[in-house]
Image: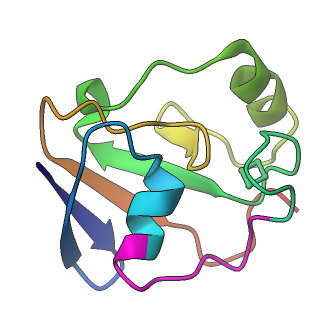
Amino acid sequence: MTTLTIIPGDKTVEVSEGMTLLAAIQSAGITLSTNDCGGNASCGTCHIFVQEGRKGVSKTTKAENEKLDTIVGVGSKSRLACQAKVLGTENIKVEILGFDSGR
Ligand code: FES
């Protein structure tokens, strides 16, 4: 199990290897005001920052990279929560963006 910390709020939850960060965040009882495309890397509304533990998350796919390229405010910590999967190798801290990033 991996400990996922979600900021703002410093909420922590234990998550399993193979879960998407979107599912992991939802398992903490947090609903992103996003998920418009159902997790297909096409809406960009699940854009988050992985602040710590980036090596504990799956690599960015081509589809994810292409979508991230269209989003304002993307940086080196950016991921689409629906595409990034927990590898189980290290704990992860994510930041939920409070401004409907990706829209
Ligand atoms: S939910 Fe649409 S890109 Fe992640």
**In terms of image quadrants, where is residue 5?**
bottom left
Display colour scheme: rainbow
Image point (72%, 22%), residue name: 65
In this picture, residue 20 sits left or right of residue 67: left
Label the magenta part by its dominant secondary structure: loop
Q: Verify whether residue 30 appears in magenta.
A: yes
Residue at the (26%, 39%) spot, across then down = 17
Which residue: 39% across, 61% down?
Answer: 24
Residue 11 in the figure: left or right of residue 82: left
In this view, the residue in front, 90 or 51, is 90
Q: Is residue 83 left or right of residue 89?
A: right
Q: Quadrant of residue 55?
A: top left
Q: Indicate the position of residue 27 as horizontal and vertical percent values.
A: 38, 73
In the image, is residue 45 above or below residue 91? below
Q: Which span is picked out in magenta?
A: 27-35
Q: Position of residue 2 (x, y in %)?
A: 14, 49
